[in-house]
Image (spheres, rainbow, N blue to C red):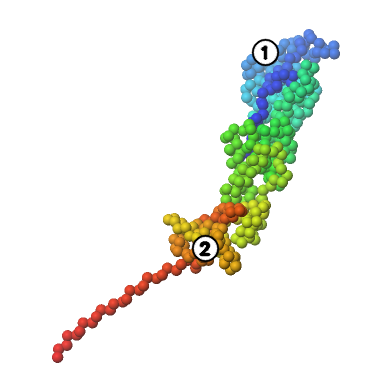
Amino acid sequence: MNATRKLSGIALVALCLTLGNPGNLRAQAPAAAQDSGAGKAPAYTLAEYNAYQACAGEKAPATQIKCLDDFVAKYPNSALLVYVYPLYATAYNQQKNPQKVIEFADKLVALGDKAEPGIRYQALFARSMAFASLPLKESDPGAKEIATKAREAALLGLKTLDELKKPDNVSDEDFKKQKQQPAILFNYTAGNAAMITKDYPAAVQSFKAVLALNPDDLSTNYNLGLAYKAMTPAQWMDAFWYFAKAVTSKGATQAQADKVKKYLKAQIANYQGGNVCDSLTDGELNELLQLAGSSAERPGSYSLPSASDISAVQKNMTIATVFADLKAGGDKSKLTWLAACGLEFPDVPGKLLEIVPGTDAVVLKIAFVTSQAEFDAATTPNMDVKVVGQPQAAKLEKDSAPRFTGTLVSYDPDPTFFLHWDKAKVNQEDLPKERAAPKKPVRRPTRKPSGRSN
């Protein structure tokens, strides 16, 4: 599953209140005959102003763009460019041309203080929206440069957002709420851009800023998990945690949750070297999802054994150590079970206490023993062994000591401790010997008396 810049769960509706409407960047220029403030006349002519107004009045995007091109050609250094560039961006946005929206948003921002903070904010908002719609891949030529500029612009958007002055008729609380969605967009854009440039610590910082405002967003949690996974070395516990937060997001559809859940399960299995017992991965996954659904932060004690942890246990593992560790319980038993489940163990010793014959398999109820004293004392089985393809196993004698090779598939912890084996074969030396059929006596033909004559 690849990273996505789709703004799932993030409102893409521009604010139309005191912050202006970033989806429509039109700003009204003062008429040439009006004062622009501080007793100064506008720095453009009436003809210039009328030409700009004519373009602003165009409704069709293509016609408006043609008009704006003519204006810029005639007045390349006009003071009205601060209003012209937003018109360009709005027209190209209507044409679904994000590259051009970005181009003219950048031109507006390049004007610096000539554009008021509100207009710059609108341009930067539109730029982030346009970047989100770009079909940009990490492998695309120039992707790193495009993403670097997108992150810089998004961070500038956050700074510009802070520069906006609260109107007198709006409360502090309402103004704070109005700025929340733009802050989410800018941080999300900065995080996605950092992912493309492989600056994963920066991506983590930006995505966490989004979650501080909207902690239940599926896409942000998922992308944060990808950022932790991509670090060197990978921060697996953090990655698993945020993938789980994405699965348990209240805003996630069932299809979205199932898709991320499947991905998370595969990542856990891969981290642990590919568990042979699928049920173990399911158990770990369910435990993680329960934690993620009930806790805002990952518990410091949460961890999963890695493939190297499991391999280290397997190097010195015998069926006797497995039996002892599982019976003891605790954390060690969990690690031992991860290492042992699904493995085949050879020549497992035991005392046969019961035989359950069947058509396809024979089930032997056996007590695991490692000494003569244990053998003599054993009266209750603690293993069931499914023997396949050896019907003669049904003829084993009770209280005998057959050895078997089988696959350990599950176990029941104390107080009813029991191991369950599948695909087992009893050692040929321990199977009852088939009695040879008695040989038939060899009958020799009787000789006929010779026909002598006296």
Residue on which the image places disc 1:
57
Question: Is label 2 in a helix, a strand or a loop?
Answer: strand
Between 389 and 270, which is closer to the camera in this rendering?
A: 389
For the N terminus, the quadrant is: top right
Q: Name the spot of residue 357 as percent of width and height, x first.
A: 45, 58
Please tell me which residue is depicted at 69% across the width and 22% down the height of the picture: 14
Q: Is residue 434 above or below residue 135?
A: below
Q: Earlier in the sequence, mark 2 or mark 1?
A: 1
**Any part of residue 115 in sight:** no
Between 88 and 23, which is closer to the camera in this rendering?
A: 23
Between 314 and 388, which is closer to the camera in this rendering?
A: 388
Residue located farthest toward the left when viewing the structure as drawn: 454
Q: Kindly indicate the quadrant of the structure image that contains residue 58.
A: top right
Question: Is label 1 in a helix, a strand or a loop?
Answer: loop
Q: Which mark is residue 352?
A: 2
Residue kind at label 1, given as amino acid type: Gly
**Any part of residue 288 in sight:** yes
Total numbered labels:
2
Please tell me which residue is depicted at 71% across the width and 41% down the height of the picture: 298
Q: Name the spot of residue 93 as percent of width and height, x first.
A: 65, 23
Please tell me which residue is depicted at 33% across the width and 74% down the height of the picture: 440
Residue located farthest toward the bottom when viewing the structure as drawn: 454
Q: Name the spot of residue 355 as percent of width and height, x first.
A: 48, 60
Q: Residues within 10 Å of mark 1 (few under 14, many from 20)?
A: few
Q: Residues within 10 Å of mark 2 (few under 14, many from 20)?
A: many
Between 170 and 82, which is closer to the camera in this rendering?
A: 170
Q: Are marks 2 and 1 in contact (CB under 8 Å)?
A: no
Q: Name the spot of residue 89 as percent of width and height, x first.
A: 68, 22
